[in-house]
Image (spheres, grey):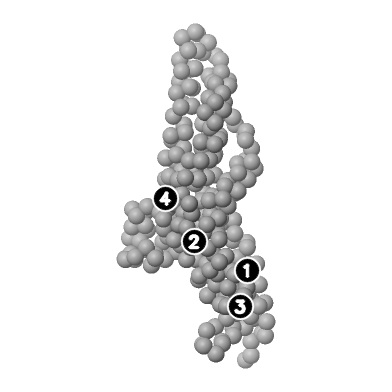
Amino acid sequence: MPGIPAFTVETDADGNQDYTLTLQILLLMTGLTLLPAALIATTSFLRIIVVLALLRQALGTMQTPSTQVLIGLALFLTLFIMSPVLDRIYQTAIDPYLEEQMDFRQAVETAMVPMHQFMIEQTRETDLAMFAEMAGVELLEPTEVPLRILVPAFMTSELKTAFQIGFMIFIPFLIIDLVIASLLMAMGMMMLSPMIISLPFKIMLFVLIDGWALVIGTLANSFVVVGGT
């Protein structure tokens, strides 16, 4: 029984199989729905947004900056950090595909190589070993790690690193809270919330040390990007 002409797989003279344009568009649109999950699971976005959320909590400014502002900052910082990887993907996969030098499947496989290498560079060996052991897979070379093991190991490593950075951010603000709370108790003003008094001091400290530049610079430099500066 012949298939639907728009949804068929074609075989070229070399024996390589390629999807028809309609099927490629369908796969592309389906992939776009998974883009938010891929952004969180395979890029630097996860570490950045967790650290920024912990920073806001350490400052005690409640909803300032707003969640939309933090997500926007994290998104554009992610694009900045991932730009060497995205450039490699464009040069090695997207551009040759648009020039019809490789088929759709080859382009996808080629595009995954820089992303795979980026995630490997950020992932701890202990996390890889843990997920490989749970999956019953023996890891020989980093390039041979399957995505079903690499992605959860990468996310686990990113969360660990984000919480380590967040812990270091919390310490100076926690010291200010403790000092203010001790002073209020010594003055017998126990009914006054220490957060109200400590908030201006924490904001002043953060501004004086140029905190946003320090945090963003630390986040950007905490990633190992192959092909970057």
Q: What percent of the width, then of the height, locates residue 86?
A: 55, 60
Residue 41: numbered disc? none
Mark 1 vs mark 2: in front: 2
Specify whether residue 11 is in view: yes
State the image quarter where residue 134 is shown: bottom left
Q: Is residue 31 above or below residue 191?
A: below
Q: As rendered, which of 74 and 183 lies closer to the eye?
A: 74
Say what amino acid the circle numbered 4 marks.
Answer: Ser
Residue 28: numbered disc? 1
Disc with the residue nearer the chain's start (3 vs 1): 1
Q: Determine the CA span between mark 4 and mark 2.
A: 16 Å
Cβ–Cβ under 8 Å for marks 3 and 1: no
Q: Determine the CA span between mark 3 and mark 1.
A: 17 Å
Q: Residue at x 49, y 17 (%)?
A: 180
* Pointer 4 residue: 157
* Pointer 3 residue: 100
* Pointer 2 residue: 115
